[in-house]
Amino acid sequence: MEDSFNAYVSGRLAALSRMAYLLCGDRHAAEDLVQVTLVKVARHWERVIAGGDPDPYVRRAMVSQHVSLWRRRWRLVQLTDQPPDRPVPDGTDHLTTALAVQAALAKLPPRQRAVVVLRFFEDLTEAATAEAMRCSVSTVKSQTRDALAALRPQLVSLLGVTS
């Protein structure tokens, strides 16, 4: 029985994960949902495969588990008739920054953009960046200098930061 369960999981994991993601809308919650569902299904695997195709049973179990988890989360929400005394941060500051950086990078020429991404986002050395771009280290240095010079005023205006 264990072999047939393992074979089913290895063959259907991608499809089950897609379904869970569509139910949850969140990759991490979807992974949890698949795991919890498969643990529950594994307990009754012999009975599940005795009925023929296990897919309908597993899908039904996943939907039931999703609804159950959703209901439990709503029980934890405490509704009040008064708003909180102090403002709560909305948590979108990182999105504003990410969008500003993305917009600024989009305005750079392709080689300068590549240098910035490889050096500062991928954290490569100048030599590794030169190798990845198939150019000299001095070219990486000059492209970095020019890119940062071009980015500085854009990010200052986009983020409202003073330099």
Image (cartoon, rainbow, N blue to C red):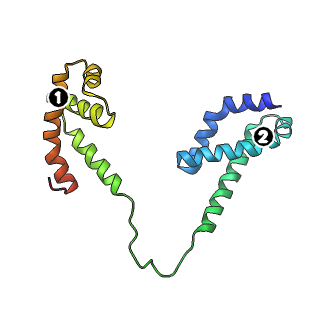
Q: How many marks?
A: 2
In the image, taking residue 130 as reference, residue 70 lies left or right, namely: right
Q: Quadrant of residue 129?
A: top left
Q: Is residue 94 above or below residue 89?
A: above
Please name the residue that numbered disc 2 is placed on.
42
Closer to viewer: mark 2 or mark 1: 1
**Residue 72 at x, y = what percent?**
65, 62
Residue 141's label in the rendered image is 1
Name the residue located 86 percent from the left edge and 36 percent from the top edge.
50
In the picture provided, is 20 more to the left or to the right than 150?
right
| Classed neighbour count for the residue bearing mark 2: other residues with Cα under 10 Å, few (<14), some (14–19), many (≥20) | some
| 144 horizontally vs 72: left or right | left
Q: Looking at the rendered structure, which numbered label has been put on residue 57?
A: none
- In the rendered image, residue 34, in percent from the top left (x then y), is placed at 65, 43
User: What percent of the width, then of the height, locates residue 140?
Assistant: 19, 26
The residue shown at (26%, 45%) is 101
Q: Amino acid at mark 2?
A: Ala
Res 46 → quadrant: top right
Which amino acid, mark 1?
Lys
Whole-number angstrom distance, CA of label 2 to CA of label 1 = 57 Å
Q: Position of residue 53 (x, y in %)?
A: 78, 34
Q: Is residue 163 above or below residue 82?
A: above
At mark 2, the secondary structure is helix
Q: Is 29 on the left-hand or right-hand side of 130?
A: right
Assign the N terminus to one quadrant of the image. Answer: top right
The secondary element bearing badge 1 is classed as: helix
Q: Nearer the viewer, residue 129 or 50?
A: 129
